[in-house]
Image (cartoon, rainbow, N blue to C red):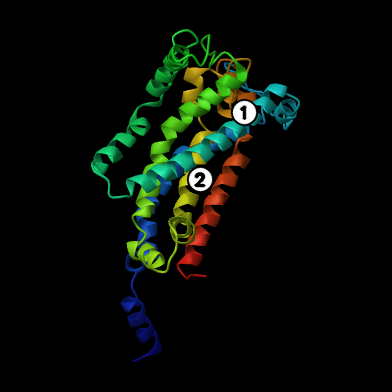
Amino acid sequence: MTRSSATDDAAQRRPGLMARLSQSRNGLGFLFMLPAAIFLLFFLTYPLGLGVWLGFTDTKIGRSGVFVGLENYRWLFDDPVFWLAVFNTLFYTVFASIAKFALGLWLAMLLNRHLPFKNFFRAIILLPWVVPTVLSAMAFWWIFDSQFSIISWVLMRTGFIDAPINFLGDPWNARWSVIAANIWRGIPFVAISLLAGLQTIPQSLNEAAAIDGATPWQRFTKVTLPLLTPIIAVVMTFSVLFTFTDFQLIYVLTRGGPVNATHLMATLSFQRAIPGGQLGEGAAIAVAMIPFLLAAILFSFFGLQRRKWQQGND
């Protein structure tokens, strides 16, 4: 047999690219992700690219703009309302995320126990998450009403206060009010996700630790929490992303008021771009959110790297 014929036979016996991908675990995962990746690339790349481009122009509604370079960003750097929105966004994200994690972890630990009707409670806890955001915001708008608030009514009836609380009219009251509304909506996502993670932890590990004399707190900190860390990293990354980019809840409750006290970067971007007509300026504010979002994604990446270490992979 000649060398050329042997080479042809070897080429015929070698599986094709699609066959090799289907036989490989990573390749099969790539094939399943490819349609979604193409969809996201098409519907996310163009809007993102257009937003970045508009941030470098002076485009207004009804008038195409010209390239102005970093002029929008220089103007934002000297804009006190923009920096107030940055502060509000970070304050809102940090406090809401910490509270959602603490309460969500507590609920997950509680629902992971052998409780009566626990399936019913698991279903009930999802209600704040599945209710549309606008309906939740309208409900909280009534709860925080300056004259007819149920909270103020209860506190006045019990003698704790003498006059209704101005929840949404005072800057700091408004900040804490929207944080409370966001916590109520976000706890179910954190709790159910962490509950799923808790159920993957073998019960034998906790039983072995208990036999060795570990206290419940030691079992939680030395066994449960380390094994739950990868799930916490991913869940909290999504929680931070959802909170940082929150728009509907703020827009329905306060529209950024009073005196810009609850304006987040997302709501300020919308206000400047659509009602204000300054598309370039609004796009620049939206682009300024990207570094914070990238930081959250990197946090998730390092959390996943920790999971590989726990599984014994380098």
Residue located at (58% from left, 45% from top): 294
Q: Which sits in the foreground, 248 or 221?
A: 221
State which quarter of the image contains the N terminus.
Answer: bottom left
Please, which residue is most extreme toward the bottom here?
1
In the displayed image of the protein, which residue is found farthest to the front? 159
In the rendered structure, find residue 178 and report the number of the disc placed on it: none
The answer to whether any part of residue 45 appears in the image is no
Q: CA distance from mark 2 to mark 1?
A: 19 Å
Is residue 184 something one can see in this rendering? yes
Amino acid found under the numbered disc labelled 1? Asn
Location of residue 266 with respect to 198 vertically, above or below: above
Position of residue 117 measured from the top left corner of the image (x, y, whole percent): 23, 41
Residue occupied by mark 1? 88
- Nearer to me, 251 or 94: 94
Crowding near pointer 2: few (<14 within 10 Å), some, many (20+)?
many
> Which label's residue is closer to the chain start, 2 or 1?
1
Q: Residue at x 40, y 40 (%)?
A: 189
* Residue 312 sits above or below residue 296 on the image: below
Instruction: Give the secondary structure at mark 2.
Output: helix
- The residue identified by callout 2 is 237
In-image side of 108 versus 64 (left or right): left
Using the image, determine if residue 287 lies above or below residue 147.
Answer: below
Pick the front one: 289 or 18: 289
**Residue pictured at 43% horizontal, 41% vertical:** 104
Splitting the image into 4 quarters, where does residue 176 fall?
Answer: top right
Badge 1: how crowded within 10 Å, few (<14), some, or many (20+)?
many
SS type, badge 1: helix
Residue 216 percent across, percent down from the top left? 43, 56
